[in-house]
Image: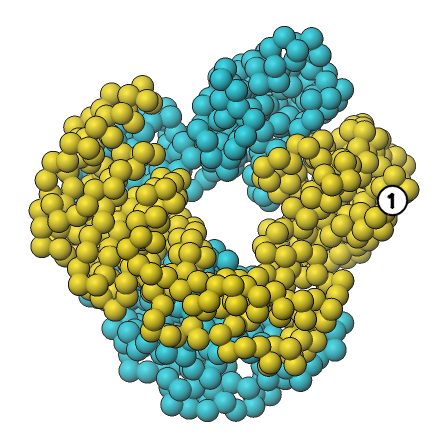
Chain colours: A cyan, B yellow
Amino acid sequence: MKTDNDFVKAKIISIGDELLIGQVVNTNASWLGNKLTTNGIQVISTLTVGDGEKDIMDALEACSDVDIVAITGGLGPTADDITKPTMCKFFNTELVFCQDAYDNVMSIFKLRGYQMSKRNEGQAYIPKACKYIPNRYGTAPCMWFEKGKTVYVSMPGVPFEMKNVFEKEILPMLLGHFKVTPYLSRVVMTTGVGESFLADKIKDWEENLPEFLSLAYLPQYGLVRLRLDGRHPDREFLEKTLDDEINKLIPLIGDHIFGFDEMSIAEVVLDILKSKGKTVASAESCTGGTIAKVITAIPGSSAAFKGTVVSYATEVKEKVLGVSHLDIEKYTVVSRQVVEQMAVGVRNLLETDYAVATTGIAGPDGGTEQTPVGTVWMAVATPDGVVSKVGNFGKDRGNNIERATNTVLEMLRQELKKSC
Amino acid sequence: MKTDNDFVKAKIISIGDELLIGQVVNTNASWLGNKLTTNGIQVISTLTVGDGEKDIMDALEACSDVDIVAITGGLGPTADDITKPTMCKFFNTELVFCQDAYDNVMSIFKLRGYQMSKRNEGQAYIPKACKYIPNRYGTAPCMWFEKGKTVYVSMPGVPFEMKNVFEKEILPMLLGHFKVTPYLSRVVMTTGVGESFLADKIKDWEENLPEFLSLAYLPQYGLVRLRLDGRHPDREFLEKTLDDEINKLIPLIGDHIFGFDEMSIAEVVLDILKSKGKTVASAESCTGGTIAKVITAIPGSSAAFKGTVVSYATEVKEKVLGVSHLDIEKYTVVSRQVVEQMAVGVRNLLETDYAVATTGIAGPDGGTEQTPVGTVWMAVATPDGVVSKVGNFGKDRGNNIERATNTVLEMLRQELKKSC
């Protein structure tokens, strides 16, 4: 059960006015939440506070009930960064010079070819009561404190630095310090069916789950992710139970499942293409390069992805992709005729086996009565021909682009399945 | 001063295991933080807890010290959504049928052409003690509670629904209910200079700021954003003081400033292009469509952006962009020669005034001793020729792509300035 007191528990504290006022999205908390959880540490809460001494003190004081407090932010060299003096106050200690921290700051400046400033020398001072943890990726030091049963780790707020120092230094230290209960999860990725209907389809199965497992529904951009997770001292038993339950679940949902374990549709499609030795390209109008971006974000995508033409201007659709000028005049650029010619055109131009294409009105302006904002035509060109369909994804520009991207990649997956 | 007790204060509570375990990034909290702050409401903290009754109750109980508690999540139709019954417990009330909520659920199902299920009928029940707020964008109801001096608003977790209902219904209600102190901020966007050096350059200015203003440094992907903000009962005085201080700041930083108020480099460049009636295209290898995506994410970008060729495969560089096969063999695909030919090639192909191009090793694999992971060649083709430079952005794939995108757009901005 999730509330079992035997589990190792953590709270995450993120420090920074820029997070509170929404100037920066707190990706550190979700990343840390994921790393802690998947390593068996139960995250109880994540709290974001500003760069104020009282708020940070209050946050620290509310954490003596957990085993681990993971703190990010406020360690920079500028005047708004006050985490270090506040930690001194909380742990009743003082800043002292740390040669290792100094050498680290020096080596980073040397590497970047910059001169070290007086301001950065201050980063070599750390609270006397802490264990110094080197941060090889930046000038801010990391710190490990203990008070009662609780370990407090303070890390920089720059995501790249925090992630590296957490994975390489801090996580191994935490797993050596605490005995954790195994946590495992399975995620089933579905598309083409709403949350409520999915819930009705699997109701009996859900109600009969063992009590150490729990299920969550996560709808987003036309997908629903189902997450089944739990904690159990016997890792093998937990693993087997999860697998058994997922095997019972699969036939209840059937073809709405496109993948497992947080794989995006792009990753699933890319794997199929690579296993078949086939290639793909995209021709994008309203998605504006997003299909290319999600594919190329995946390491190794160059094995199957050859390229994209973003044909934002009508003349690019005609001149580069070979879409008929007369068809554009007759049917408009947001039409079955145009999207099919875009898909076939980019497949021919880039000499790939498959190609996807989109053309639509992303919004917020540009809609007409016949073609309102949110209308998107999508096509997949294959060695056997071309298929297309239209979607209507509403008025939000970002939402439209994401949904059109997911939908056309799902169309490609369906075509790839046919040719198995 | 920020800690003045006269300000209207808010806490944000986000509910959902998926947020805690990092399966979903909490963009709602940052969006709400931004809306509350810019409307004069001071955000004290944002707290994320899981879908557990005790955790939600504890979170609610810790909020009687603020004026507004903005709650998102846990209002879906499935078994893991427990916000509504928990609110009943906290406010000592019970669920009752609400005809308006029922009609709303019905109308949404009708619009989508779906049949309404029993499960969704449950969404028409709301706590007796609350004021019902319609959510026209989804089936989850919104709720307004009052307890002591504190207003609690409960909203759905789906970002699109939450944003619409907050802006259109809840924010006007809050601003009618509370008398807020004006808050204003100015952001100066800089590039090409590190945080410490910036801080040294503006030290005297920073130390002499009026005490109701504060300054923050936000480094990210090769940029540093400087935010100057504050609260003051006299809005005009606040506005004038901010403007005066920014006018003093500008000459201290000079050409490192590329824009103001959270404008991205893409927005700045797009504005310049539009004002000059010029067009741009991109040829992207390692950035894989990201330049196109950041440009096309901006509404109205089609006025200046004509399109992109993502030339992931070498043959696309040759065949579509006209890069010399011999040069690729002689200099490799990651070279000055190739990136310049890509930029010129896409400028010719899409018939634009300007074009940017990238080719590099995004990682994590593919590096060589001569061309390590993180090496990126970037070029800008102009009516007068082509300029290029090489960057080394380190080992992180996502970081490389973002930094290369920002850097090449900054190169374009510099070229556009020259032709003023």
Answer with the quarter of the image where residue A310 lies.
Answer: top right
Residue sitting nearer the eye, A123 or B329: A123
Task: Judge whether A95 appears above or below A106 on screen.
Answer: below
Residue at left offset 53%, top offset 16%: A388
Residue sitting nearer the eye, A158 or B371: A158
**Where does residue A34 sit, x and y in percent of width and height?**
40, 55
Question: Within 10 angstroms of label 1, few (less than 14), some, or many (20 or more) residues?
Answer: some
Residue type highlighted by circle 1: Val
Q: Quick check: can you spot residue B96? A: yes
Answer with the quarter of the image where residue A20 lies.
Answer: bottom left
Task: Judge whether A326 appears above or below B274 on screen.
Answer: above
- Chain letter, disc 1 residue: B
Query: Which residue is identified by label 1?
Result: B386
B53 sits to left or right of A329: left
Q: How many marks?
A: 1
Residue at left offset 52%, top offset 72%: B214
Residue at left offset 51%, top offset 63%: B236
Q: Quick check: can you spot residue B373? A: no
Residue sitting nearer the eye, B332 or B402: B402
**Where does residue A103 sit, x and y in percent of width and height?**
64, 82
Answer with the quarter of the image where residue B251 lies.
Answer: bottom right
Residue sitting nearer the eye, B375 or A358: A358
Helix, strand or loop under label 1: strand
Quarter placement of the N terminus of chain B: bottom left
**Where does residue A343 sit, x and y in percent of width and height?**
62, 19
Residue at left offset 27%, top offset 34%: B139
